[in-house]
Each structure stands twice: as structure tokens, then as C-alpha cells.
Image (spheres, rainbow, N blue to C red):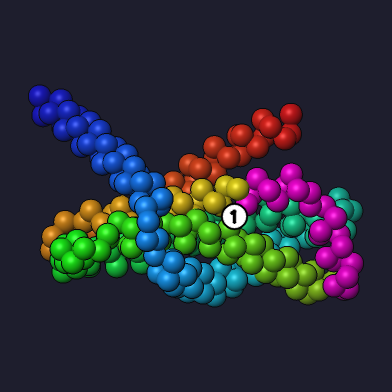
Amino acid sequence: MQLLYTLKRYSFNTVNEAGEQARFTGLFFKNIFKNGFEWNEFVRQCYVIGYGSAGIVLITGFIIGFVLTLQSQPTMKEFGAESFVPSMVAISVIREIGPVITGLICAGKIASSIGAELGSMKVSEQIEAMEVSGTNPMQYLVVTRILACTLMVPLLTLFGDAMALLGGFAGNNISGDITATLYFNKSLQSIDFSDLIPAIIKTVFFGFAIGFVGCYKGYNSNKGTESVGIAANTAVVTASIWVIIIDAIAVQITSLVLYQ
């Protein structure tokens, strides 16, 4: 009986949560097209999200390219294919590693930040105060942040991919000697639009999921200081899971459309 009650309660909570998220999604799309879009806040959020996350994304991208090159060189050398290392690193980073790692980094940094910020505003009743004063908190707080994430995560991914290629060049020159012109020619010649475009498209969905989860968890947090930490923590976990799920779906769609 206890197990049945637990399953019933879990199912009810899951359905209720799904319904609340669907309602929140509807409010988001409804407020996009309302008059009085907060352009100043949107630009500010783009700066906060993009500039605030650029450092860790660039450093991580450089290290990924550097380590991937060092790890793959011995194996490729055994087969006499060491010259293919730049192409292999470029394809791996552009198609999969760069977007996913950038998405997970942004999930950890951006989703937690948004969740904690909106959660603290909920606890201190600032959101209610905005509603009383006639300001639309959904349009000012939620729409601007989700759209800023949707725009900035693909841009951060491009910068991270570029730094990964630069890290690969540095890794190649530790045990070998290759000119920058030759390295980047080999790397870029191996990349097609069929590699770049799907990777960028899925990062748009990464950005939307990260912004949506952070805003939803913070905006709907409970009263009390403890709920701020819970909102930030659950935002990170949920956003990271969504990044992985979206990537798995995108890989399947890309494989069916482009590679068969």
C-alpha cells in the first residue's frame, strides 16, 4: 500500500509539474509579442550572460582542443595517420564536443545564476511588488532572460569552438612542428556546412532550455531563504539533463537527414 501511495503521489506531482511548465511556456510566448518589449533589459542580459560566461567557455574550449590533440596523436601515429589529427579534432569539436560542453557549462553557470536571482526576488517579494506597480514581471524578467540565453549560447559555442582549434594547434606543436597556416587549412577544409549548421541549431535549443529552466525554477520557487538554493541547484541539474536529451535527439535527426 505504501508503494502504491508513493507511486500515485509521484505520478500526480509529475503531471502537475508538466502542466505548470506548459502554462509557463504559454505565458512566455504570449508575452514575447506584447507591446513594450524590454529592449534595454534584453541587451543588458545579453551582456551579463555572454560576457559573464565567455571566460570559462574560452578556457574550457582551449583545454578541450589541447587535450584531445595530445590524447589522439599517439594512437593516430601508430596507424601512420598523424596528419589527420587536425581534421579529427576539428570535426569532433564542431559536431559534438564543443556544443555539448558549452551547453553544460552554461547550464551550470547561467541556469543557477538565473534561478538564484529570480528565487531571491520571489522570496523578498520583489516580483509581487512589480505586479502591484504595474510592471509585467514575466515580460521584464523571464522573456528577456530566455531570449538572451537563446541568442548568446550559440555565440559562446562558436567562440569555444574557435578556441578549441587554437588549443589543438598548441597541442600539435608540443610534440611536432606544424605551421598555423597548414594546421588551420587542414582543420577548416574538413568542415562542411552539414557539420556546422546542425551544431549551431541545437545550441539554440540548448540556450532556450537553459534560460527556460532557470527562469521557471526561480520564478516558481517557494517562500523562504532555503528555496533560493533549491531553485539554483535544481535549475543546474534539470538544465544539464535537458542539454543531454536535446543533444541525443539532435544527433538522431542529423543522422537520419544528412548521413543516410
Place of residue 109 in the rendered image (x, y in percent of width and height, measured from the top left) = 42, 66
At 32% from the left edge and 62% from the top edge, which residue is drawn?
141
> Image check: 204 left or right of 37?
right
Q: Furthest-left residue in view?
A: 1
Residue 131 at x, y percent in the picture: 19, 61
Q: Is residue 183 above or below residue 92?
A: below
Q: Is residue 25 left or right of residue 47?
A: left
Q: Along the horizontal axis of the image, is 207 left or right of 81?
A: left
Q: Could you tell me which quadrant the C terminus lies in?
A: top right
Locate residue 164: give its quadrant. Answer: bottom right
Prevailing secondary structure of the magenta residues: helix
Q: Please tell me in which quadrant of the rendered image residue 235 appears.
A: bottom left
Q: Is residue 184 magenta?
A: yes
Residue found at x 47% / y 62%: 148
For the N terminus, which image quadrant?
A: top left
Helix, strand or loop at mark 1: helix
Residue 70 is at least partly visible in this image: no
Q: Amino acid at mark 1?
A: Pro
On the question of residue 80 being in view, the answer is yes
Above-or-below relation of 239 to 19: below
In the displayed structure, 71 sits above or below 10; it is below
Residue picked out by circle 1: 99
Residue at image position (48%, 49%) is 243
The residue segment tinted magenta is: 177-200
Judging depth in this view, the residue of 169 and 113 nearest the camera is: 113
Q: Does the magenta segment cover residue 5?
A: no
* Towards the viewer: 120 or 182: 120
Q: Residue at x 59, y 55 (%)?
A: 99
Q: Is residue 79 left or right of residue 69?
A: right
Question: For the residue carrying disc 1, how many other residues have a C-alpha within 10 Å: few (<14), some (14-19), or many (20+)?
Answer: many
Residue 194 higher or lower than 90, as above or below? above
